[in-house]
Image: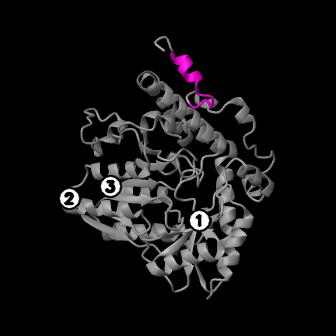
Amino acid sequence: MANLNRRQVLAALAAGAAAVPALGLQAAQRSSMPAPPAGQNAAALAKNEDFWREVAGYYDRTEGIVNLEHGYWGKMAKPVQQAYVEATRMVNAQNSYYGRKGYAADAKRAVNVIAEALGAHEDEIVVTRNASEAIHNLIRQYQGLNKGDAVLYADVDYPQFKTTMHWLEESRGVQARVISLPSRATQKDILDLYRQAFDANPNLKLMLLTHVSNQHGLVIPVAAITAEARQRGIDVICDSAQSWGLLDYKIGDLGVDWAGFNLHKWIGSPVGLGVLYMRRGTLEKVAPYPGETDPDNSKAATRIHTGTANFASILAIPAALEFHQAIGAANKEARLRHLRRLWTNEAQDMPHIEVLGGADEASWTGMGAFRLAGKSSPSDAKDLQQRLENEFGIFTVVRKGLASGHCVRITPQVFSSSQEIASLTSAMRQLRA
């Protein structure tokens, strides 16, 4: 073992997880990955059930239930799972010899793959355990606040981040302001409400802005709101936990300085992976994590201290992104939007159903939510979730935090079938009682 070199260590990765990013999966695996048919645009491909049936074959199926709750985390496709398993075996076998000598270079390759996919520079990217870690650190370590300043969040934001914004109020002497969005909204509606909030709170210094709401999939016009905020001297922390892979975009499209992402939701990495994005030249307003130092404000990585990470999961990142890109980001977004339309178009004509989320296509994603008309309490939502599960065999999840009340979220994935969505609409028709 003393003579084991780096080449021999990397050869142990049969799935190529520590190889050059472009070779994240073995040639045999790449040749068998989904290949969208030539000549079909994303809109046409979204309705091609044969292709998406092929895609579904790359995933292990949930048994015993129609699972329409994939917003928690996404499954790994089988080639990604294989890369992760093989990486786990290698790391376990090579232990600290690999950890001390080989891991740093391989982790850097994973960062490079993420940066390229997001359209960012590699020094702007830090791998985290999840988006929550990234965003909580951005909020807590933000240095641009003085007593009497105000911070802004919305009802559509992640519940724990709202709590952290109030922690700023208690610990920094600032005022936490909240904006409530309609249960159905257009891009214009949302932008107008944020402008009104800016006008009403001229002392705003920091804002949390969610790209896609975890409750009902509403898309917030981040770029337009951020541009308006920048003109008023308001800094923006962007929660992109649910958006990357659900929507097709690059980080530059959002125009934000700081953001947190998940890799284990719509990108399909192993569980426990996220990303902190910090645009070059913006580090001075966010302090390093306690115990870390960065006197030149040049190292985004000092804003996080994860400790010993799951090496194997990070080694599987190139494989996850390669599989994601094989399907195509635009194709995934179009398919998920199509699956959402299959149920929302029908549900909107059911008088006993209230559909939540976007009121125009730009405000929709493949994720949506609904509740029974006039029933928005916690117990109402819990009863609805239980009825769907116990009476109709459809698994969903209750979401809270909206000013308009509780709801049940519907979150299909690329391996979900139109037949499964049809079972949902059939159940919804029977929910009158």
Query: Of circles 3 and 2, which is in front?
Result: 2
Note whether 180 is above or below 34 in the view shown. Answer: below
- Dividing the picture into quadrants, the one containing residue 195 is bottom left
Residue type, label 3 = Gly
- Provide residue 160's location: percent of width, then percent of height: 36, 61
- Provide residue 308's location: percent of width, then percent of height: 38, 36
198 or 377, nearer to the observer: 377
Q: Secondary structure at mark 2?
A: helix
Residue type, label 1 = Trp
Residue type, label 2 = Ser
Q: Residue at x 47, y 49 (%)?
A: 261
Magenta stretch: residue 15 in it?
yes
- Decide which of tag 3 and tag 2 comes sooner along the chain: 2
Tell me: 70 left or right of 96.
right
In this figure, which residue is indicated by the disc labeled 3?
233
- Mark 1, Cα crowd under 10 Å, few <14 / some 14-19 / many 20+, is many
- Decide which of tag 2 and tag 1 comes sooner along the chain: 2
Note whether 343 is above or below 36 in the view shown. Answer: below
Tell me: 279 left or right of 422.
left
- Decide which of tag 3 and tag 1 comes sooner along the chain: 3
- Dividing the picture into quadrants, the one containing residue 393 is bottom right
Tell me: 228 left or right of 322.
left
8 or 288, nearer to the observer: 8
Question: What mark, if any, has residue 171 been given in the picture?
Answer: 2
Note whether 331 is above or below 339 in the view shown. Answer: above
121 or 267, nearer to the observer: 267
Magenta residue span: 5-17
Question: What mark, if any, has residue 178 been given in the picture?
Answer: none
Label 3 to label 2: alpha-carbon separation: 22 Å
